[in-house]
Image (cartoon, rainbow, N blue to C red):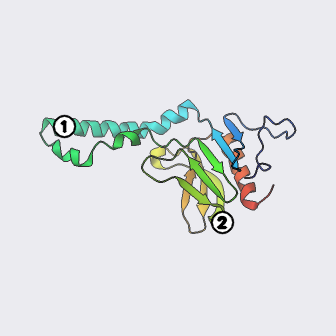
Amino acid sequence: MTASSLVDSSEPETGIPTPPGVQLEHPRAGGVRVRVTIAAGDRVLLALPRAVLALGIVTLLVEAWRRRVFIGFWFFGLSFLPWLFGPAQRSLLIGEREVEIEGTPRFSTPVRVLRSSIARIEVGRGAPFQLFRRALTVHTADGQRTRLLVGLSQEQAEFLAAGLRRWLAGED
């Protein structure tokens, strides 16, 4: 997305309103940064499966301690705790040639999708651990799917999908 394909609603000459919870910024390095505020209810629903799994793991650790097999868990460590909070995907940095998800999960590298590899962009659903909440889905030419900003409202998702499609088509 270029600065003209998504325009900050605070600029009165543009007249393009952004939906509630979406902020557009134009960093000096170029591109557009889209910050999304996800509703508290959706954040709780997104954390629920992780909390249940973490509770199961803690129960398993307590049982292992009681039965004196706790030493086996030291090999794996307690690295699941950062995972419990989930990915902090709250903004996209849309440059001239790629889309980067800012605030990616702690156990992977930053997610960048090249503009040339994107086949289509649609509003889809998250994974089972994300309780199938609404998300932007990027389909690449090699058949892979990348979910962006899980937990969006309908208005936010449609606004961002339309802007990303314009960016992909090269419209200004």
Give the residue displayed 12% in from the left and 39% down from the top. Answer: 67
State the image quarter where residue 51 is shown: top left
**Neighbour tally class for label 1: few under 14, some 14-19, many 20 plus, Cα within 10 Å:** few
Looking at the rendered structure, the kind of residue marked 1 is: Glu
**171 left or right, relative to 140:** right
130 versus 143 height, above or below: above
**Neighbour tally class for label 2: few under 14, some 14-19, many 20 plus, Cα within 10 Å:** few
**85 left or right, relative to 167:** left
Image location of residue 159, percent across then percent down: 72, 45
Give the residue displayed 71% in from the left and 50% down from the top. Answer: 30
Farthest residue in the front direction?
A: 28
Give the residue displayed 61% in from the left and 41% down from the top. Answer: 152
Secondary structure beneath disc 2?
A: helix
Farthest residue in the top direction?
A: 40
Image location of residue 45, percent across then percent down: 49, 36
Looking at the rendered structure, the kind of residue marked 2 is: Ser
Image location of residue 24, percent across then percent down: 71, 40
Give the residue displayed 64% in from the left and 48% down from the top. Answer: 93
Query: Which of 159 and 111 lies nearest the eye of the viewer?
Result: 111
- Disc with the residue nearer the chain's start (1 vs 2): 1
Secondary structure beneath disc 1?
A: helix
Query: Which of 117 and 132 lies nearest the eye of the viewer?
Result: 117
70 versus 39 height, above or below: below
Residue where numbered disc 1 is placed = 63
129 versus 21 height, above or below: below
Residue where numbered disc 2 is placed = 116
